[in-house]
Amino acid sequence: MSWELNTPTVNIGGDIRGRCGETIFTILHKFYLNKSNKQSDKLTTRQNFHKPRLMRKILFKKNNFKTAWLILVTFVIVVHSTAQTPKLTLDLTKPGANVSPMLYGLMTEEINHSYDGGLYAELIRNRIFKDNPTRPEGWSLVNDDTVNTKAAIKLMATTQDNIPYDERRHAINGALQTCLRLTVEKAGARVGIANEGFWGIPVKPSTTYKASLYMKGTARTEPFRWPWEPKPTTPPLPDIEDNTAGPITVTIESNDGKTIYASGIINLARSPFWKKYELTLTTPATVKPTTDARFVISTNRIGLYYFNLVSLFPPTYNNRENGNRPDIMKMLEDMKPKFLRFPGGNFLEGPLITDAFPWKQTLGPLENRPGHRGSWGYRPSDGMGLLEFLEWCEDMNAEPVLAVYAGYSLNGDHVDAGPLLKPYVDDALEEIEYVIGDVKTHWGAKRAADGHPQPFKLTYVEIGNEDWFDRSNSYDGRFNQFREAIEKKYPQLICISTIADAQYPNLKVISGKKPAVLDEHYYRNSWDMWANASQYDKYDRNGPKIFVGEWATREGAPTTNLNAALGDAAWMTGMERNSDLVIMSCYAPLFVNVNTATATAPKAWQWDSDLIGYNSLNSFGSPSYYVQKLFSQYLGNKIVSITAQNIPTQPRPLTRRDSMQGTTKQELVPTVFYSATMDENSGAIYLKLVNTTGKKQPVQINLNGIAKVVPNATLITVKGSQPDDTNSIKDPEKIIPLTSTIKGIASVFTRSLDPYSVSILQLQIAK
Ligand code: AHR
């Protein structure tokens, strides 16, 4: 393939030294020689033409001034119109290499409240009271009459040292061992517990929410005590009557409690044992959407009330139980992802070996899911479990790329290859069996019991995540042990190594077979993206295939801005032109809850520069999101080879690293990027063009090798007036794709690219 990116012939904003410039200077030279032979000797070299002072002297010499001026004007016009116009020649004489059918996908993990407080539609924060071992985070006491009511809430945990031994006895099962107790000694009016949700419970008109909770209500009962045990000197609980049985009110209401948006009643049984209650709450059509709301369970009777696994779901995507938010799912579907890489990322590994993604305890009913310590500073509920990930793939018509824990965690601990690693390898084999095993297998049967008898499609298994951080050099052995076991049982599966040869040549897997696919990660600024957009042009075609499993242009927070989108688009043209080699790519992180800190909840995100932002009510795409979506949507099945000429460049500002290294020469970086693919069946050509500068940029396009092209084409652009233009929860559509029809398409045509723009031209070969 000829992927010739013609390096700079024209330097925007600097001296004009291009080939065409040279020609004009030659004309000027000749003119001057005719007019004045005095100085001709001095102007025999090209070098001399670049000496501005000398030029001025010659041009402004009295007699020659008028003519020279005319020539200069002509020169400027010519230079800026035709001669320097970048030229892209698309070779349509023969079909190019195949575009990888898996090229664009998604990467996901629990970061920035991606699931809890994000895609996963659960609205209750800390529903099993385990988020914080010392206080019921997200929960508060509701007391409508502080004068006449005496009430308190307390976290109760069977495993907690700050609770007297005889109070540690309210577990529902091994997963649900912590609960919340509401003690009502005097009830002047309504008293209860409130959940603030994930930065607010979203209220929408005419919406039915499904609520469920475990509850029991009793008077004070003497806790179990062996006969030889002394009675506590201070009783743990006040002596109160058992008035708990009867109606309990459940509401979605404003945070000040003044407006009730939806309300329902459950009938609490007279029983000291746990019972699950379910009800629905429906908002009226007149309600204005808001996030300024809470979920309340209340009574006006004295007693002791215990709560666990409190859940509230709005309508979900495809009405799936325990499902996802429809608005975010729609945005993902629109991206047409071919795969979903999960469950991480750092989330796969966990801070410690014991915190790795515990896929087995994310299966089955929510009652069996204790959650676990996540990798990003908050405790995931694991409501988004292994099956939910797989069904999410299915809903998007995408294939899972399953990352299995490979014995290395974020604190740097690793499990050496050999017998110590075997349990982890076995665990991965079981996980794979859950995904693709026949219903007759142990884990296939479990999947069927969980409601999905049909095995899922799986081609790629990733062994760990970013194992270049493991400086013990154990990955070589760990990768091989996993790969051998996986390939033995599932020869059809392809194992991905997380250490890229190009990035970490000293750490790469060297023993055994060469890994078939390497996962490379790039988090860069836009200059780095532009400077490296053609890096895959130079990769060895006989080496492993490349999966760019995490990457992003990191500019703008919490979601990225237009300049980042220009960096992304440039980078994507490079991947697309080389998609015979780069078989998969996915941006990261995908999601961010954009809420800032409140009095009771911390800032929602841990990682700046994310693709899709949301609060509990609304979601929006960053400019980068639209670039991802368009690149994936407008993609053919064959790469079209392009030869480029006169690609303009700009000097890259010197970086801190440059000054540390004593580099003073500014690197020239292209300002126009391009790729093209073609749909062999329909004859559609998708030409992607990026202009990273604030000036309009004409580009001449030559369609080489086709007899006729339809004169009208569809043009989709993502653009803005400033590089830091962005979308936000308050201004979600400042930058969105604009579609138009353009005329005058011929086998040679010129298109002027808008400033700061990504353009996709859909051309059509005429029959
Ligand atoms: O995408 C955020 C983090 O970046 C991922 O969890 C990790 O793999 C990478 O370092």
Image (cartoon, rainbow, N blue to C red):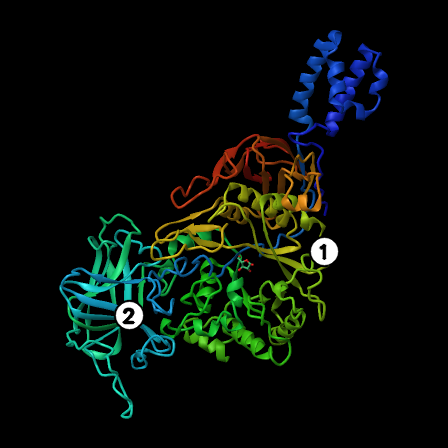
| Front in this rendered view, residue 678 or 756 | 756
Q: Is residue 640 visible?
A: no
Image location of residue 610, percent across then percent down? 49, 51
**In-front residue for pair 657/66:** 657
Q: Is mark 2 within 8 Å of ligand 1?
A: no
Q: Amino acid at mark 1?
A: Arg
Which of the two discs, 2 and 1, labels the residue nearer the N terminus?
A: 2
Q: Position of residue 454 (x, y in %)?
A: 47, 70
For the C terminus, the quadrant is top right
SS for tag 2? Answer: strand
Which residue is under mark 1? 541
Q: Residue at coordinates 44% horizontally, 53% vertically from top-left?
A: 592
Which amino acid type is shown beneath numbered disc 2? Lys
Q: Is residue 280 visible?
A: yes
For residue 247, above or below residue 16: below
Residue 275, given in percent of the width and then of the height, sits at 26, 76
Q: Indicate which disc residue 102 carries.
A: none
Kindly identify which residue carries mark 2: 154
Residue 49: percent from left, percent from top: 77, 23
Instruction: Please report the residue visible at 28 percent of the width from the left and 67 percent of the height from the top.
Output: 212
